[in-house]
Amino acid sequence: MLEAAHENDIDLEGACEGSLACSTCHVIVMDTKQHNKLPDPTDEENDMLDLAFGLTETSRLGCQIIASLELDGLRLALPAATRNFAVDGYKPKPH
């Protein structure tokens, strides 16, 4: 979905370009039945979702949703904001 959003000028950030290193492509699946058709998120996706703004029960990362005929009619919403530590003033501390 991340690639489709970018190809259609939808404002879905995707700062890590789909490498599961951020939560800026966080989307909310609007229909629970459609959400249940998606494969379960991996541990890596869940770790990134824990950082997402406005997390819901049907939240997923757009980069992990692969379009298929089974998902025809899938409706997604974008959260009101994203957390992008690279531009939101986050300064990593040295170890």
Image: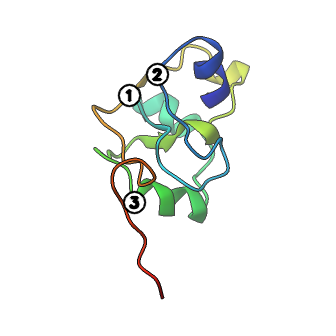
Q: Is residue 8 above or below residue 75?
A: above
Residue 1 sits in quarter: top right
**Percent position of residue 81, x then y:** 30, 36
The answer to whether marks 1 and 2 mark residues whose Cβ atoms lie closer than 8 Å is yes
First in sequence: mark 1 vs mark 3: 3
The 10 Å Cα crowd at callout 3, few under 14, some 14 to 19, many 20 or more, is few
Q: Is residue 2 above or below residue 47?
A: above
Residue 50 is marked as: 3
The answer to whether marks 1 and 3 mark residues whose Cβ atoms lie closer than 8 Å is no
Q: CA distance from mark 1 to mark 2?
A: 9 Å
Point out the frontmost of discs 1 and 2. Answer: 2
Residue 55 is marked as: none
Is residue 15 found left or right of 28 in the rendered image?
right
The residue identified by callout 2 is: 11
**Percent position of residue 79, x then y:** 33, 33
Point out the frontmost of discs 2 and 3. Answer: 2
Q: For the point 38% across and 50% down, which residue is it?
A: 52
Q: Is residue 79 above or below residue 47?
A: above
* SS at mark 1 in the image: loop
The residue identified by callout 1 is: 78
First in sequence: mark 1 vs mark 2: 2
Amino acid type at circle 2 is Asp
Amino acid type at circle 1 is Leu
Q: Is residue 5 above or below residue 23?
A: above
First in sequence: mark 2 vs mark 3: 2
Q: CA distance from mark 1 to mark 3?
A: 16 Å
The 10 Å Cα crowd at callout 2, few under 14, some 14 to 19, many 20 or more, is few
Amino acid type at circle 3 is Asp
**Percent position of residue 27, x then y:** 44, 34
